[in-house]
Image (tube, coloured by chain):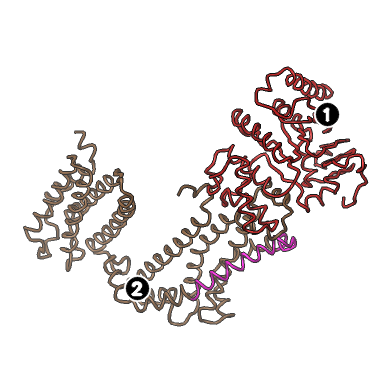
Amino acid sequence: MNAIFRSWQGALAFLLCLAALISLPLLTADAPSPFSIGTLALIFALTIGTALISFTSPPAPLLAAILFVGPHLATWFLISGLAGYEGKATMAFFLLIAACWLLAWRCVAVLSDMHPKLKGGDTFLRLLIPAIFGAWILILWEAITRGAGIPFILLPPPSAIGARIAGSVATLWADVQQTIFKAVLFGYIVGCASGFIVAILADRIAFLRRGLLPIGNMVSALPIIGVAPIMVMWFGFDWQSKAAVVIIMTFFPMLVNTVAGLGAAGAMEQDLMRSYASDYWQTLIKLRLPAAMPFIFNALKINSTLALIGAIVAEFFGTPIVGMGFRISTEIGRMNVDMVWAEIAVAAVVGSFFYGVVALAERATTFWHPSNRGG
Amino acid sequence: MGAFYKMPMNEHSSSVVSARKLGLTFETSDGPVHALSNVDLEVRKGDFVSFIGPSGCGKTTFLRVIADLEKNTTGEISVNGMTPEEARKSRSYGYVFQAPALYPWRTIDKNIALPLEIMGYSAAERAQRIERTLDLVNLSGFGKKYPWQLSGGMQQRASIARALAFDADLLLMDEPFGALDEIVRDHLNEQLLKLWSRTEKTICFVTHSIPEAVYLSTRIVVMSPRPGRVTDIIESTLPKERPLDIRETPEFLEIAHRVREGLRAGHSYEE
């Protein structure tokens, strides 16, 4: 009984398999069954077998391996059997997918409880667990869209999006070059740098600090939808107008955060510099800027996502026939939703990579901050 | 300030800090606060002067006026024969704060190098001074650590090393051991005395511990609050060589008693 409680996912999966067995076949009657008796038996053997093994307690790595192979192999048979019969899956099909999902859940649970002694093993687990987690989002997405025959326009299956990405590498690459390498990078660097420089000026010159900051807060509330077409009028259709939008979006977070960061150094630390008769620039470089780094990196991280959004949305308002925002707005009009999803996927990957690079730089620079120590 | 005050320099040629009728009033929204009033004090070269009193008596404020971190509103003060501002600009004192105030992004070595970098010492000179001062405070071998990897007592020792790294004859210490436990504090007091006799610096030391003040000082300045003022100045009769158990001797207890009386007098004046 204890074993069943320990692996309640296995118990539930077992029950789902029995329910699936009763409600066979896997596809509706009007589809000539593509599942041979052999395949069907294999799928059931894999799921029920894995569910039963999950009640026993072999060594954790072995158990995890069985729990990994069994349900994923069964899922692969199930989904590949769908080919040509989209929208014809029955209750039994989804019950089996659910059973496999529960077993994979059990697999992740077993993996999460493992504490490998080797350092490499730990890293491997840290990557494997979210990978299984993410893979199941795609598997469920694939099984539901194809099994239930959800219209392509509403939600294409991930396999179609993947195929589209693989088939349009050249187009996607051109779009990334136009939007990311030109508009986003240029705008991000110029926007962040100018925000930083103006923050230093505002720190030195009281009237800028008193006058500019309140107005800065107002400008940062400007709607990008309103600004983008005006920037297109000013700077033309090419990437320069998108870079301008990115500059406007990234300038003020950087300005406000840097000004706040420059005030972050403690009174005692500042008195110490004063006792050394340190001048303004020495105090700035040796004390106030290092103390401001957590704030500055906060702005860099906020801006890394803002820049991407700004550049893509700005392309909706006029652009040469290349760019991620342009592609999304035109392909949605032509009902090529798989291409839209492909652009979304590419933007997500590029955005995560961008953010990751900034986060790594942050860890290297502010290793001393209490939130990063020992990490 | 800015003006150079005429001091009886010939009388006190070895005077390091000299205050005449010194007063400091903070204007607050609740009206003026008299942090210091009518303070007359002479600190001679090589003295170890402790300032003791309840909170609000102006002992820290007085130290900050010497350091030119606050400006006196009345009276005169000279530091090394100069105004406090000139003394600060000529880097004539090292200041140890209540907390170590080490920069967490710098190693201990680099923290000690901080004043040396600002004052323009060469790299070779810096390395040599870091090694020497780390040895003075018994922290050799910890130079590559970050401050947050050390205990509170070690951090405070590192901050003392930082104040000793450059050539200032005057060391201003504002309750440097206030946050540490009794055992660590005893140990650091003993080390501080050794360091003082080895370096022959003049030390102004703010504390609110009577045994600490009596154990360390050649002179004890007793202060009392509202307005902050000096109520008694006690010359210590203890020898320069002081083992920790000198604190059990009748002589020590007698001085401690006088300090306590002075503190009590300051309080009863209030009620």
Label 1 Cα crowd, 10 Å radius (few <14 / some 14-19 / many 20+): some
From what the image shows, is residue A277 above or below residue B264? below
Disc 2 on helix, strand or loop? helix
Letter of the chain shown red in the rendering = B
Dominant secondary structure, magenta: helix
**Residue A160 image position (x, y, % from top left):** 27, 69
Q: Secondary structure at mark 1?
A: strand
Residue with the most extreme left position? A37
Residue A192: in magenta span? yes
Q: Is residue B68 magenta?
A: no
- From the viewer's perspective, is residue A7 above or below residue B85? above
- At label 1, the amino acid type is Ile
Residue A287, percent from left and from top: 64, 54
Q: Are marks 2 and 1 in contact (CB under 8 Å)?
A: no
Against A43, residue A333 (above or below) is: below
Residue B257, placed above or below residue A157:
above
At which x and y percent is residue A116?
Answer: 30, 46
Chain assignment, label 2:
A
Q: Which chain is brown?
A: A
Residue lying furthest top: B250
Q: Which residue is at the front of the view, A292 or A355? A: A292
Residue that badge 1 annotates: B233
Give how far apart the Cα atoms at labels 2 and 1 are: 86 Å
Q: Is residue A114 left or right of residue B145?
A: left
The residue lying toward the viewer, choosing from B86 and A90, is B86
Residue carrying label 2: A339
Under mark 2, the amino acid is Met
Residue numbers of the magenta segment: A182-211
Q: How many marks?
A: 2
